[in-house]
Image (cartoon, rainbow, N blue to C red):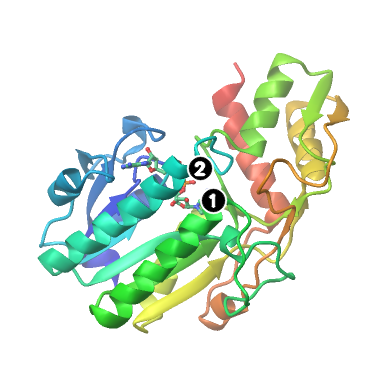
Amino acid sequence: MNPSDANVLVTGGAGLVGSHLAASLLDRGATVHVADDLSKGTRDRVPDGAEFVEADLTDPGDVARAVTDDLDIVFHFAAYTDTNYDDDRALFEDNTGMTYNVLERIREVGVDRFAFTSSSTVYGEAPRPTPEDYAPMEPISVYGSAKLADEALISTFAHSYGVQSWVFRFANIVGPHQRGNVIPDFIEKLDADPAALEILGDGRQEKSYMHVSECVDAIQHVVETADDDLNTYNLGTRTTTSVTRIADIVSEELGVDPEYQYTGGDRGWTGDVPKMRLSIEKLSALGWEPSIESDEAVRRSARELIDEIVD
Ligand SMILES: NC(=O)c1ccc[n+]([C@@H]2O[C@H](COP(=O)([O-])OP(=O)(O)OC[C@H]3O[C@@H](n4cnc5c(N)ncnc54)[C@H](O)[C@@H]3O)[C@@H](O)[C@H]2O)c1
């Protein structure tokens, strides 16, 4: 499907990935609607030219306002995204509930294309690089469990109700305006105290980081190119960056030389997968390659965030 001349809805379009996708789709000529409850995203991040609907997608009434029968595709990116959220029940019920609400509504009004942002966390602590057909899927966080449940629902709608679907299992996506992740966290801490930096875990956690500009490019390539009923793709880079390396990059970009203070343990918090790298061979076979590897994605994002955060 070519989204360039389509009528599209991006849920979560006031957040990091959704706002970048909405902007990219607008540039390519699509008609773009954004639905977001602004719980984490902000109104100023919705690009000019997109029609904005303030909607809480856990509420079926709000979903009915946002999802109309003239849409060609829904990109469902809205979710509570704090992976170490302290209310597990709310995280599970709200994230799976809003996915169910959107799927039920698109079936009701006859929209037959759906794209979804899943996560590397569905694999749990799996061998790396992890391919899409890796089994058994054993997530270790409620966030990852909810994403896996979402994927199961999408499979059902794709195979039984004719909703062609694209599922993207993301590595760590980084970019401007992001908050509550390791890069802005380090910048904020070093801005307050350039002499010392507390690092959660032992610093050896090692994950693959992808810049948001690359992520939205890959999403559009896959939606245009993959044409099965259900198309599941890992999105990431081929390399990884350790937490200590992120601290080094952020320190270099800020021009400071702090003493690192590790909190200990091999992971940042309960449910954190300490080492993650996704196989992107399936994506590569579809003709898409990252042009920025993991360290460079972290550095670019650090520069963008320093401009925003530091006076
Ligand atoms: N950024 C990453 O590293 C990453 C990794 C894996 C998966 N994902 C997934 O990608 C998607 C986008 O992530 P992001 O990084 O842009 O996160 P984000 O938090 O910046 O964006 C999510 C958006 O959803 C909105 N939202 C939350 N609850 C809502 C509700 N009930 N109704 C309507 N809107 C609601 C928020 O206000 C926010 O604007 C999410 O589904 C996330 O789980 C992200």
Residue 163 placement: quadrant? bottom left
| Secondary structure at numbered mark 2 | helix
Q: Is residue 210 above or below residue 231?
A: above
Task: Choose between 4 and 14: the one closer to the eye.
Answer: 14
- Please name the residue shown 31% across and 51% down the image: 98
Q: Count neighbours of disc 2 (C-alpha within 10 A) and say few if under 14, some if 14 to 19, many if 20 or more.
A: some
Q: Inspect this view and state whether residue 227 appears.
A: yes
Q: Amino acid at mark 2?
A: Asp
Residue 104 placement: quadrant? bottom left
User: According to the image, label 2 marks what residue?
Assistant: 88
Q: Inspect this view and state whether residue 18 appears.
A: no
Q: Which quadrant, please, contains the N terminus? A: bottom left
| Secondary structure at numbered mark 1 | helix
Q: Is residue 187 above or below residue 74?
A: above
Q: Amino acid at mark 1?
A: Val
- Please name the residue shown 81% across and 37% down the image: 248
User: According to the image, label 1 marks what residue?
Assistant: 142
Q: Are marks 2 and 1 in contact (CB under 8 Å)?
A: yes
Task: Give whichever of discs 2 and 1 has the lower sequence position.
Answer: 2
Task: Give the left or right position of residue 87, taking residue 189 as reference.
Answer: left
Q: Position of residue 188 (x, y in %)?
A: 65, 23
